[in-house]
Amino acid sequence: MIDMLKQPKTNPGAGCAVAVAPASNEDRVQAVLAAFARPTAKKFPAWLQTIRAAAAVDAAKVGFSTIRDEEWKFTNMAPLLQLPLHPAQKSGLAPGLKDISGFTFGLDCYRLVFVDGYFCAKLSSLPGKNNDLQLGSLAEYAEANPSEMRKHLTRHACGGMNFFTALNTAYFQDGAFVSIAAGKTADKPIHLLFIGASEQPGSTSLPRNLILAASGAELKIIESHVSLSDAPRVANGVTELALGPNARVEHCMVQQESEQAFHVATVQAVLSKDSRWTSHSISLGARVARNQIQARFDAEGGEAILNGLYLGGGDQLVDHHTVVDHAMPHCASHEFYHGVMAGRAHGVFNGKIFVRKDAQKTDAKQTNRNLLLSDTAMIDTKPQLEIFADDVKCTHGATVGQLSDESLFYLQARGIGVENARRMLIQAFASGVIERIGIAPVRAYLEERLAGRFLPAQK
């Protein structure tokens, strides 16, 4: 652990330097929880307050995640505890539209904008009154739709043994609520844009999102996280998705925070009979990014497709953990994760497919491919299968390698310069994931970002 508290401090009363014992992890966690527990203006319904209080107890009990924990052994979050962590404050000054135009993908969509975790109506674009499609601030809907909220909010990603999810559950102040009625298709994609604007080190936003698709409904969701400040801030978000029978939801998360930021994301989807969830997790920014993507089948016939692309350079650390819980028979899951690491970057992929005893006829595939562009870049990959049924088709595999000398020679032999040849091969590798995104403007935006990501354009 990096410990910034080991320097001797001066005791004014004694007039000499004395060594102060560094605070323990437990002390730091208690200090963090105390900072977040201060009274806030927002009061939630009693049923939710009870859940939040229990989550605060869970967070204190579980403690901060360290490399001693099996699920975090490759991802050192200790530098985060060196920050003066405190809840982000709601700002009265929203950034102007000119400040966020570069983050909108040029999409014709409905958009919910959140600044430091709080809903900003001024920058948002919502549909007119429409009972079939409900969009807005989660904090507002928590009181307006108590029955629907009570059934799903905090029920799918409740914290348990995860400190960051428990912290979010206990202290979130706002987030996005999306609900579409049975048999309806949203006429436009829905963009959830989260902007980190605070310049205070340690400012921590805790957005909580709830996405509900009733029976036979269809939605396309883009969830993006960006920074307007280079301050070492923290985003710790949780997104819960509940799909009704035969529902279709595509969820694309694009993370491009500043390279001083810490980003922790938990996505939990629950699938009903014959439903289909497609997830894309694109991680481009942040000093440390940890993405926990999880799917659970609650009925037969469901399908989950999990795609991921993580790019790292400099000293970035990018971690993807996936869990697909085949709790019911006749379900399918397919995972495709690609990583590209340059400089001294560190990539982590840990994918678990869990097939329960009665989940016969499961069809599950998992592929993780990684590309190292320097001798100092690093990848830790750990695909896992835990199978307790005997009539299943399950495969997994992982590869780590460098650019092929033969492929580079082939391109150079056709008059393509070495830098452009490298760029073409890197972009082709990454595009294997990008091209799976079903929202054309997002695909085009990401392809443009990929071009020249690691190499300057050759003149």
Image: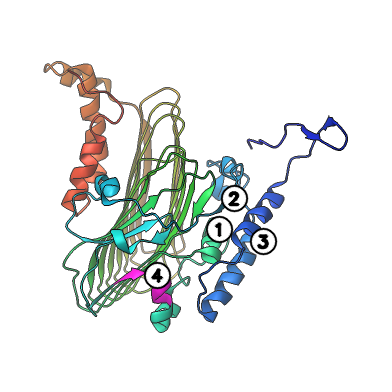
152 vs 83, left or right, is: left
- CA separation in Å, label 1 and label 3: 10 Å
Amino acid type of the residue tagged 2 in the rendering: Ser
- SS under mark 3: helix
Q: Is there CB contact under 8 Å for labels 2 and 4?
A: no
The tag on residue 49 is none
- SS under mark 2: loop
Q: Is there CB contact under 8 Å for labels 4 and 3?
A: no
Amino acid type of the residue tagged 4 in the rendering: Leu
How far from the left and from the top, in percent, is residue 369?
A: 34, 39
Q: Residue at x 18, y 44 (%)?
A: 444
- CA separation in Å, label 4 and label 3: 27 Å
Amino acid type of the residue tagged 3 in the rendering: Lys
Q: Residue at x 27, y 20 (%)?
A: 405
Whichever of callouts 2 and 4 sits on the residue coming sooner in the sequence is 2
Whichever of callouts 1 and 3 sits on the residue coming sooner in the sequence is 3
For marks 1 and 4, give the one nearer the viewer: 4
Amino acid type of the residue tagged 1 in the rendering: Asn
Quarter the C terminus occupies = top left
Q: Is there CB contact under 8 Å for labels 2 and 1?
A: yes
- CA separation in Å, label 1 and label 4: 22 Å
Q: Choose between 187 and 67: the one closer to the eye.
A: 187
In this figure, which residue is indicated by the disc labeled 4?
A: 138
In this figure, which residue is indicated by the disc labeled 2?
A: 65
For marks 2 and 4, give the one nearer the viewer: 4
Whichever of callouts 2 and 1 sits on the residue coming sooner in the sequence is 2
In this figure, which residue is indicated by the disc labeled 1?
A: 162
- CA separation in Å, label 2 and label 1: 8 Å
Q: Is there CB contact under 8 Å for labels 1 and 3?
A: no
Q: Can residue 351 be seen by looking at this rendering? A: no
